[in-house]
Image (cartoon, helix red, strand yellow):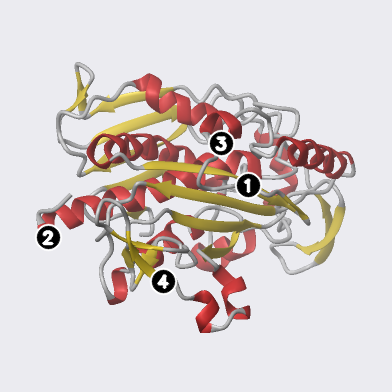
């Protein structure tokens, strides 16, 4: 019921923020893929809380346990189950949320849909659910790299109105990981950190944009009509918590251009391949990858739970006020980077397997 994503490479996440643990079951992973807990842990460490002064102070090692599907360092082709146990829960921080709805959070809508909810840390609506996605994304990345040489890399493009100039063609993982805000433009990164610290000190929060590039994507991924590649990418990243917008290529800025300005003209490169002189399409045309870099942007809203007092209502329909407690990110953007990468990798891996299954071409 909404907990499974993908077709041939399929994941199902489970668990809640303050339950025993969270994780994922991955089905459809090809056999004999070399994968280790350390490779998965690398991605989880980029996502985990408490990693810097501008993230939530919740202390979780987020150590992964591979329960099935891997033997002697290789995948078996059977379901892979990965578990991360919750350790540093402080459910008492949420006592007031038993009866009061947090503004712009999922409390009221969960009650409206199910008539019951786990108020401890937000339950399934918590960003801790994304642990399973990031763990699965690490395996998807490995498949993409080994089979097709595809690289998926995300970074913080904007926080509030502070936007960095970044070359998606040349940016590296080392540059992204060189600072705690994960913006590869160092001068802009320092300003972003100061901006987040200021919001945190005021008991407030900030939103922004994560940009993600997928390089060396082969032509032919994606299907016409309902399974267009950009449609699945949009669904994948927009299923992440706190997302409010999606763009690919020129995005909304393309609406300001004439067709003669926006069209990507074709040419033949030195290898005899059909290429485009520009990439305003963002690597996808007609719902199918064209061999150029896929470039997307995802908008994240400011963190919903803040320390400032705001108006709200109780579960009994009485108006009241609420000042958020607990440990929360003043800005989700730095930790959202590996989440976006994971969802892009999961979509591309699924479509790579589907392309091979239908057309026998990789």
Going from N to C along the chain, the mark reached first, 3 or 2, is 3
- Comparing 5 with 34, the one in front is 34
Q: What is the spatial separation of the Cα atoms under label 4 and label 1, in whole angstroms?
A: 24 Å
Write down the residue under mark 3. 18
Q: Residues within 10 Å of mark 3 (few under 14, many from 20)?
A: many
Going from N to C along the chain, the mark reached first, 4 or 3, is 3
Q: Are marks 4 and 1 in contact (CB under 8 Å)?
A: no
Going from N to C along the chain, the mark reached first, 1 or 3, is 3
Q: Give the foreground label among 4 and 1.
A: 4
- Comparing 288 with 5, the one in front is 288
Q: Residues within 10 Å of mark 2 (few under 14, many from 20)?
A: few
Tag on residue 358?
2
Residue 129 shows in the view:
no
Q: Which residue is at 31% across, 46% downward?
A: 11
Q: Which residue is at 79% across, 67% downward?
A: 318
Write down the residue under mark 4. 265
**Figure quadrant of the N terminus:** bottom left
Question: Where residue 52 sits: x, y (%)?
Answer: 70, 27
């Amino acid at each position: 019921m909404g907990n499974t994503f993908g077709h041939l490479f399929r994941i199902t996440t489970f668990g809640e923020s303050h339950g025993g643990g969270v994780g994922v079951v991955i089905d459809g992973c090809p056999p004999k893929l070399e994968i280790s807990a350390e490779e998965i842990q690398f991605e989880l460490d980029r996502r985990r809380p408490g990693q810097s002064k501008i993230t939530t102070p919740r202390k979780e090692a987020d150590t992964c346990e591979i329960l099935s599907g891997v033997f002697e360092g290789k995948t078996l082709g059977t379901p892979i189950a990965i578990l991360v146990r919750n350790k540093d829960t402080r459910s008492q921080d949420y006592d007031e949320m038993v009866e009061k709805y947090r503004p712009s959070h999922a409390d009221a809508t969960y009650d409206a849909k199910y008539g019951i909810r786990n108020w401890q840390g937000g339950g399934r609506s918590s960003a801790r659910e994304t642990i399973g996605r990031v763990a699965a994304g690490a395996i998807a990345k490995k498949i993409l790299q080994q089979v097709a040489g595809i690289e998926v890399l995300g970074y913080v493009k904007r926080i509030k109105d502070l936007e960095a100039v970044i070359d998606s063609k040349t940016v590296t993982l080392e540059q992204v990981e060189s600072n705690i805000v994960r913006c590869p433009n160092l001068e802009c990164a320092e300003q972003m950190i100061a901006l987040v610290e200021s919001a945190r000190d005021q008991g407030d929060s900030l939103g922004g944009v994560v940009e993600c590039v997928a390089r060396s994507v082969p032509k032919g991924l994606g299907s016409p009509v309902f399974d267009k590649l950009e449609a699945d990418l949009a669904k994948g990243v927009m299923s992440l918590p706190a997302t409010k917008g999606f763009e690919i290529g020129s995005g909304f800025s393309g609406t300001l251009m004439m067709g003669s300005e926006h069209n990507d003209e074709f040419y033949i490169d030195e290898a005899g391949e059909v290429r485009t002189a520009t990439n305003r399409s963002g690597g996808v045309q007609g719902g199918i990858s064209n061999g150029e870099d896929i470039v997307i942007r995802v908008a994240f809203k400011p963190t919903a739970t803040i320390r400032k007092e705001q108006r709200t209502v109780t579960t009994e329909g009485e108006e009241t006020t609420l000042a958020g407690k607990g440990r929360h990110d003043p800005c989700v953007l730095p930790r959202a980077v590996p989440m976006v990468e994971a969802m892009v990798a999961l979509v591309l891996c699924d479509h790579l397997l589907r392309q091979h299954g239908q057309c026998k071409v990789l």
